[in-house]
């Protein structure tokens, strides 16, 4: 068998593995079933009106959901579909990057490392901004490498386009060009790139993609950046090295405990790094450092450094390809497959080992029972079809908007002040609504509190849904009329 045929067989084998993994994940989504996380239902409300921006995120996640639901309807699997598709495509791009940088074997291992990464296994069941971010991060990296190698203008243009789409996926994508600046510090090749005008043309193209989103933010008082500032909570918590250490420890679960240790150990062991190896480390460390600083100063979720793990997969694939024995590869992949299976089949897994599922140990606790819970209220919405759904909480508006019949993605928001805290506050505040009769769903407000805002308040029902022995969901539904006007709302936006 000649070299090209061997390479084609290897790549086709990986394509087959990727396709089987996609089918498996779709089967898990359908068979379990994996119901919507409230952020997904929330993003679906964005997708009803594709725009250049949304309250807390740039637009691509909304566009993707609009695409998949436009093709296949609003079923849960269709809302989620872009996630497993994009993660599989990213694995294929990772294969191609390492094949170009190092070898076919390095590409194969890199693709497997990415495809079976615990974060990817988890996120393949839920549509988030990570899916398009990682896909465009990998595509921009591949285009950059091609442009670096041949300086062809078409590759620089593609790098800029992918970079622009990445910025429209997640604002932290801005760390990608930071990686290239770091590459210039550690490599003469990197310095040459910074003096290449075509590199700056690519950067300009990427920024041009972002301009419509910046204009959207300008029209909405830069609400996305206000939100980013709020969730960062800089200065509101004391510096905590323990919090940063916890973030680092959780990265073992993000990438996989064995493969992350292998990558870091081999990176330390590798003293004379090639330019390609340096580039991949430069694509890894800036994101890790920035999010680690966030964890030190305030708070950082375990997935916030997700972009770093594209290059981590590439580095891991490279180091594994140089090892004579495949022991670490087998251990690493086995650990990640075990984590994936334990998560995907959590109910069967806990039943097998005799562990009772409770709020404190069930990773699905935030999605369990919502369709059934919402259906307990359906008769009351049927009784008052002309009343508009309203709430003080975006989670309730998102879930009820999706699981009620008919669906309503324009639920009205009233949370007691003028602070814009989510999409419903921004687009559908009650004080600007043309409706005057509402069914108000809440898990906090009492009849007395609602009477501050409405002339007529009647409790229709209070429902409870037991999720575990130690946890239940409950909410109350009120029929309200006669909004008393904006003057009864407290202007606390500055205070918050």
Image: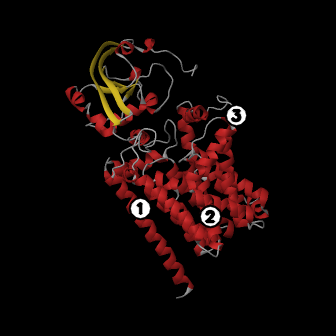
For label 3, the SS is: loop
**Residues at marks 1 and 3, CA–CA distance in whole angstroms:** 42 Å
Answer with the quarter of the image where residue 439 lies.
Answer: top left
For label 2, the SS is: helix
Residue 316 image label: 2
Answer with the quarter of the image where residue 370 lies.
Answer: top left
> Around disc 1, counting alpha carbons within 10 Å, would you say few (fewer than 14), some (14 to 19), or many (20 or more)?
some
Q: Earlier in the sequence, mark 1 or mark 2?
A: 1
> Marks 1 and 3: which is nearer the front?
3
**Is 17 in front, or is 135?**
17
For label 1, the SS is: helix
Looking at the image, the residue that sits furthest to the front is: 354
Query: Does residue 377 lie above or below 73 as drawn?
Result: above
Q: Are marks 3 and 2 in contact (CB under 8 Å)?
A: no
Q: In the rendered image, which residue does mark 3 sit on?
A: 239
Q: In the rendered image, which residue does mark 1 sit on?
A: 22
Q: Is residue 194 visible?
A: no
Q: Earlier in the sequence, mark 3 or mark 2?
A: 3
> Around disc 3, counting alpha carbons within 10 Å, would you say few (fewer than 14), some (14 to 19), or many (20 or more)?
some
**Is 430 in front, or is 364?**
364
Quarter placement of the C terminus = top right
Q: Are marks 1 and 3 in contact (CB under 8 Å)?
A: no
């Amino acid at each position: 068998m000649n070299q090209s045929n061997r390479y084609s067989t290897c790549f086709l084998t990986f394509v087959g593995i990727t396709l089987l993994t996609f089918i498996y994940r779709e089967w898990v989504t359908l068979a379990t079933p994996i119901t919507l996380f409230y952020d997904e239902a929330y993003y679906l409300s964005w997708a009803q009106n594709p725009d250049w921006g949304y309250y807390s995120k740039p637009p691509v996640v909304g566009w993707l959901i609009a695409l998949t639901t436009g093709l296949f309807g609003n079923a849960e699997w269709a809302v989620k579909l872009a996630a497993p598709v994009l993660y599989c495509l990213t694995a294929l791009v990772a294969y191609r990057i390492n094949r170009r940088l190092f070898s076919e074997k390095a590409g194969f291992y890199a693709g497997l490392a990415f495809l079976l990464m615990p974060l990817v296994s988890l996120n393949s069941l839920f549509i988030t901004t990570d899916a398009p971010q990682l896909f465009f991060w990998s595509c921009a990296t591949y285009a950059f490498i091609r442009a670096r190698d041949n300086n062809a203008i078409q590759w620089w243009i593609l790098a800029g386009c992918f970079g622009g789409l990445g910025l429209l996926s997640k604002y932290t994508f801005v760390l990608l060009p930071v990686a290239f600046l770091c590459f210039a510090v550690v490599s003469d090749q990197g310095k040459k790139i910074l003096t290449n005008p075509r590199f700056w043309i690519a950067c300009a193209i990427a920024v041009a993609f972002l301009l419509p989103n910046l204009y959207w933010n300008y029209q909405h008082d830069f609400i996305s950046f206000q939100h980013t500032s709020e969730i960062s909570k800089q200065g509101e918590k004391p510096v905590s090295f323990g919090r940063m250490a916890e973030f680092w420890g959780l990265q073992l679960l993000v990438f996989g405990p064995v493969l992350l240790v292998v990558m870091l150990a081999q990176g330390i062991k590798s003293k004379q790094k090639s330019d390609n190896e340096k580039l991949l480390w430069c694509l890894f460390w800036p994101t890790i450092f920035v999010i680690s600083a966030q964890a030190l100063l305030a708070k950082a979720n375990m997935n916030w450094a997700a972009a770093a793990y594209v290059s981590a997969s590439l580095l891991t694939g490279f180091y594994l390809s140089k090892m004579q024995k495949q022991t670490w590869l087998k251990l690493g992949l086995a650990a990640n497959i075990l984590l994936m299976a334990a998560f995907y089949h959590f109910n069967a897994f806990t039943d097998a080992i005799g562990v009772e599922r409770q709020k404190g140990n069930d990773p699905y606790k935030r999605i369990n029972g919502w369709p059934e819970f919402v259906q307990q209220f359906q008769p009351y919405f049927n009784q008052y079809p002309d009343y508009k759904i309203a709430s003080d909480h975006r989670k309730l508006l998102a879930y009820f908007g999706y699981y009620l019949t008919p669906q309503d993605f324009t639920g009205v928001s009233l949370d007691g002040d003028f602070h814009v805290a989510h999409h419903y506050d921004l687009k559908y505040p009650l004080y600007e609504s043309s409706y005057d009769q509402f069914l108000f769903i809440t898990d906090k407000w009492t009849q007395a509190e609602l009477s501050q805002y409405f002339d007529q308040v009647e409790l229709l029902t209070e429902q409870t849904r037991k999720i575990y022995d130690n946890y239940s969901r409950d909410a109350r539904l009120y029929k309200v009329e006669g909004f008393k006007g904006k003057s009864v709302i407290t202007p606390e936006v500055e205070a918050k």
